[in-house]
Amino acid sequence: MPLKLAIISPCVSISGRRFGLVAINLIALCARPKAMSTQRSGHLERTAQEPRDESLLDVRLERIDQVNERIRLYRLKLESGPIKFLAGQWLDTYIPGNPKPGGFTLTSTPRAASDPKSPYLELAVQESPENPPAAWLWQSPSDITGSKLQVRVGGSFVFPPSEIPLNDISHVVFVAGGVGINPLVSMMGHIAEEGYNLEVKVLYASKLPAQGLKGVLFLERIRKWFTEKELIGDLKVFTTGIYDGHIESRELDVHERRFTVEDVKEAMGEKNNSVVYVCGPATMTDEIVDGLTRDGGMDKNRVMLEKWW
């Protein structure tokens, strides 16, 4: 499988099987730059070559939760369907009165969308006033909760990988930068729910919000998967930015710096059957991919890159 350099849908939206005893060493790196004004009309164009479903589905905006000062979580109740998607995919999201969709990464799991009692989808959207779909979603929750939207699934940055047999993979190492955690948390949740017997390692770098670690997107959800043994392995958190309060680790392995290529290599260990998922801004992804593959390093066929601009 060739090195995949795809400039496609967002990780956190700013614009927009149980396989038995399998051990997976997937290194997934994901981060994302701030939205630019060009994103307002570019999602469909940027993702034109990506696979997407033909049909639009009706959803209702059921719930909005404030994660921190910049990010909200949205629960979309499915009102038509059924819907099937792979962990890591995104939604074309059509808001009322706008013919152009935003592109928002799904953070919920495929199983949540097939719940017979209350199927739902989840999105994490960063505040972005210059982007119409995101700006609409950042209105007062009382004004938009209950609104009807339409969505369509798309994207090829998925877990399990489509072209590499799971028997040829040994460990999973997810490396996320900032809101790039979005597709990865869907992948981790899928692994936890489906009963994979995996060693999973997570390296998660984030700028600390005003709430400190408590406000880091999905950190508590991921920590819980490890403490409750739904994921077997370890979680390392890398923090940046200025935070006035004390960094309460809550039994987390916290490093007050950015992660490096060497951190990723250490997480990989001597495992040969690794698959690397890289999703993020060009500077981060280029540095990580180059560091992992140059000078006789990892086979580039095992590095899947989704680049964000």
Image: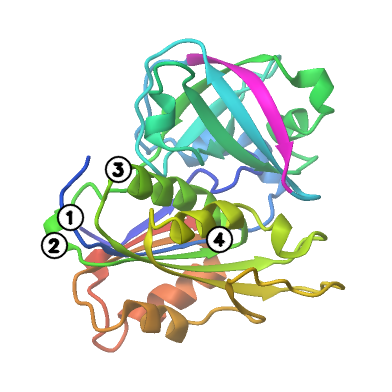
Q: Could you say where residue 100 lies in the image, as x and y percent from the top left? A: 61, 24
Q: Could you say where residue 233 lies in the image, as x and y percent from the top left? A: 37, 68
State the residue position of label 3.
194
Would residue 248 be found to the left or right of residue 165 on screen?
right
Density class for disc 3 (Cα within 10 Å; few <14, some 14-19, many ≥20) is some
The numbered dot on residue 309 is none
State the residue position of label 1.
164
The numbered dot on residue 31 is 4
For the record, the magenta segment spans: 57-67
- For the question of whether residue 157 can be seen, the reply is no
Pointer 1 or 3: first along the chain: 1
- For the question of whether residue 117 can be seen, the reply is yes
Regarding mark 3 in the picture, which secondary structure is present there? helix
Density class for disc 2 (Cα within 10 Å; few <14, some 14-19, many ≥20) is some
Pointer 4 or 1: first along the chain: 4
Q: Which residue is pictured at 51% across the width and 82% down the height? A: 260
Would residue 271 be found to the left or right of residue 159 on screen?
left
Residue with the most extreme bottom position: 295
In the image, residue 245 sits, relative to residue 59, either above or below, namely below
Residue with the most extreme front position: 228
| Front label number (3 vs 2) | 3
The numbered dot on residue 168 is 2
Q: Main secondary structure of the magenta part?
A: strand
How far apart are the two marked residues, 4 and 2, measured between alpha carbons?
A: 26 Å
Mark 2 residue type: Asp
Regarding mark 1 in the picture, which secondary structure is present there? loop
Regarding mark 4 in the picture, which secondary structure is present there? loop
Mark 4 residue type: Ala
| Front label number (2 vs 1) | 2
Regarding mark 2 in the picture, which secondary structure is present there? helix
Q: Could you say where residue 186 lies in the image, as x and y percent from the top left? A: 45, 45
